[in-house]
């Protein structure tokens, strides 16, 4: 039986070894390549990689360089990328998908990895419901706000984040009066009475 060849990119040696031991208990999975840093990951020969597992944070200072690795892998022809991480921030989840990830698994759900890897290998995706909800919410918002200009879209998103008119004016370097006018236009376009 041919084994699914895996690339594992993880900066924590304990997690790295634990995941390798766990995955290699499966008859059809083998960790072919591994990297601890973004720099190591970018130098790997991906020609034998079937599925890549990437941590988002690849340094002690908490940078999100795993997202850069995902983008590089996608551009290099690796299209089966699973983010394995502790991050659950909606913006980071969406950026991971934007950069080429086909699935997103929390480290606390690592037991699901063998099944998720097999699904990815077969071009199937079964996204967890909490991740699916984040993606669907963003998709609905994106479709809803298509009628807005780029600046109206930015004002809308800032308002949804809870910024006051004064805070938005400061952030966008506009007058409060301009922000109020833009909010009126946005309300009309989206038929939203409360913004």
Image: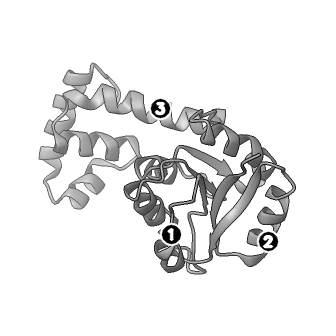
Do the numbered discs 2 and 1 sit on residues whose CB atoms are within 8 Å?
A: no
Q: Nearer the viewer, mark 2 or mark 3?
A: 2
Q: Nearer the viewer, residue 60 or 126?
A: 126
Quarter of the figure with residue 49 = bottom right
Q: Secondary structure at mark 2?
A: helix
Residue at 13 percent of width and 45 percent of height: 177
Whether residue 57 sits left or right of residue 105 in the image: it is left
Q: In the rendering, which numbered label is found on residue 137?
A: 3
Q: Around disc 1, counting alpha carbons within 10 Å, would you say few (fewer than 14), some (14 to 19), or many (20 or more)? A: few
Tell me if I can see residue 64 in this picture: no
Q: Around disc 2, counting alpha carbons within 10 Å, would you say few (fewer than 14), some (14 to 19), or many (20 or more)? A: few
Residue at 50 percent of width and 49 percent of height: 101
Q: Nearer the viewer, residue 129 or 10?
A: 10
Q: Secondary structure at mark 3?
A: helix
Q: Position of residue 33 (x, y in %)?
A: 63, 68
Which callout, 2 or 1, points at the residue further toward the start of the chain?
Answer: 2
Q: Nearer the viewer, mark 3 or mark 1?
A: 1
Residue at 64 percent of width and 71 percent of height: 34
Quarter of the figure with residue 143 = top left
Q: Position of residue 40 (x, y in %)?
A: 53, 78
Disc 2/disc 1 C-alpha distance (Å): 21 Å
| Relative height, residue 7 to residue 151 (above, below) | below
Do the numbered discs 2 and 3 sit on residues whose CB atoms are within 8 Å?
A: no
The residue indicated by pointer 2 is 17
Q: In the rendering, which numbered label is found on residue 45?
A: 1
Q: Nearer the viewer, mark 2 or mark 1?
A: 1
Q: Position of residue 133 (x, y in %)?
A: 56, 32
Residue at 65 percent of width and 58 percent of height: 6
Q: Residue furthest right?
A: 25
Which callout, 3 or 1, points at the residue further toward the start of the chain?
Answer: 1
């Amino acid at each position: 039986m041919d084994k699914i060849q895996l690339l594992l990119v993880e900066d924590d040696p304990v997690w790295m070894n634990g995941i390798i031991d766990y995955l290699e208990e499966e008859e059809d999975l083998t960790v072919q390549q591994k990297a601890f840093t973004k720099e190591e990951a970018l130098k790997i020969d991906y020609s034998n990689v079937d599925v890549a597992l990437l941590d988002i944070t690849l340094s002690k200072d908490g940078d999100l360089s795993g997202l850069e690795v995902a983008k590089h892998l996608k551009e290099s022809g690796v299209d089966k990328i699973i983010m394995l991480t502790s991050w659950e921030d909606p913006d980071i989840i969406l950026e991971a998908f934007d950069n080429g990830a086909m699935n997103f698994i929390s480290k606390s759900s690592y037991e699901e990895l063998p099944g998720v890897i097999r699904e990815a290998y077969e071009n199937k995706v079964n996204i967890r419901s909490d991740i699916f909800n984040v993606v669907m919410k963003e998709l609905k918002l994106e479709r809803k706000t298509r009628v807005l200009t780029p600046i109206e879209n930015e004002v809308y998103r800032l308002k949804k984040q809870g910024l006051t008119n004064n805070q938005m004016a400061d952030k966008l370097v506009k007058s409060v009066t301009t922000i109020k006018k833009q909010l009126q236009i946005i309300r009309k376009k989206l038929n939203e009475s409360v913004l």
